[in-house]
Amino acid sequence: MIKRISALILASICMLGVLVGCTAPETPTKPNVTPSTPKPEDNPEPNEPEIEKVDMYYDDRLNLNVLVGGVADGVEIKDQVVTSKIVGSDQPDANVLVLDEDTNRVIAVGTGTAVLVVNGKEYNVKVTPAPITLAVITGQSIGSGSKGDPQKSVVCEGGQVYNTTLWIKEDAWRSGLSGSTLGFTAEDRFADIDMLTNDAGSKKGTQGVNGALGYHWNQLTGEKIWIVNCAAGGSCVNEWQPNSSTDFLNKTIEAMNYVSNILKNEVAAGHYVY
């Protein structure tokens, strides 16, 4: 019985082999292919390096050596599109960026966009209005601080902290309000407005409330701050009361109204935001 089954299986395998071996091969048909235009991805172009983006606020000062991590050379500013205006005018600012060759920095003197080229590399720069806070310090002269020892003074970064000192105890204090703009390149900026910063040169930094307040405010919030010191050396608390014979309080209010209007004009020009 087992031999019969084995014989049947063997016969079946042999017949299958004959059938397979005797089958005529099919004639392959030529595929119907329509020639197509090569797609871009079939021949990819070498990728161009992406242009880096740099965001700045108005009156920021960008250190080019820090930007490139070495010596910055061959600096070019091009394709400037200005969106801010000259203070008190409908005319646009002259530039978005200017190069300060003495310090190898680029300064944002307007808002808008520009292309900065350093060492042959391009950067897309966007400058927006700078957040700013206006502060007032009143009282004795210690509020405005003293220049003191530069090693012990608080020194702020340029373009971040502004300072205006008005000695309201003196008759000529209003002459300190002759300025009308804050920007770095403005011709009528306040005298010593950069006193708290590295831009003040030998006068940089102070020992007192204003330098510390400006530095920490800027570090904690990222905002610029304009500190107006209405100081009266040797004054007493009662001299700051309303209706005092010294009238220090009303003089300070007058000064703050004046600087508030200056800042209001800057905001209208598109340089700062409150």
Image: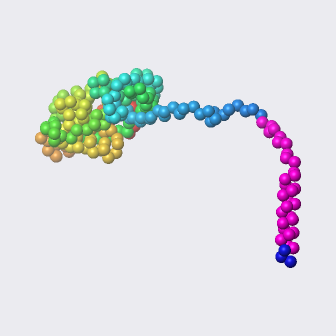
Considering every residue shown, the one lying at the far left of the view is: 234
Q: Tell me: 86 left or right of 225.
A: right
Q: Mainly helix, strand or loop, the magenta region?
A: helix
| Residue 90 seen by the camera | no
Q: Which residue is drawn at 37% across and 24% down?
A: 75
* Foreground residue among 239 and 69: 69
Q: Tell me: 79 left or right of 247.
A: right
Instruction: Assess whether residue 71 is covered by the magenta stretch.
Output: no
Q: Residue 84 location, x and y as percent?
A: 43, 28
- Say which quadrant the N terminus sits in: bottom right
* Residue 137 sits above or below residue 91 on the image: below
Q: Residue 89 location, x and y as percent?
A: 41, 23
Q: Residue at x 25, y 31 (%)?
A: 199
* Foreground residue among 126 and 121: 121
Q: Residue 116 location, x and y as percent?
A: 41, 27
Q: Which residue is drawn at 22% across and 38% down?
A: 155
Residues drawn in magenta: 4-33
Picture quarter containing residue 191? top left
Considering every residue shown, the one lying at the far front of the view is: 3
* Foreground residue among 26 and 118: 26
Considering every residue shown, the one lying at the far bottom of the view is: 1
Q: Residue 30 location, x and y as percent?
A: 81, 38
Picture quarter containing residue 189? top left
| Count of residue discs | 0
Picture quarter containing residue 195? top left
| Residue 119 seen by the camera | yes
Q: Tell me: 52 left or right of 169.
A: right
Instruction: Assess whether residue 10 is covered by the magenta stretch.
Output: yes
Q: Residue at x 13, y 37 (%)?
A: 148
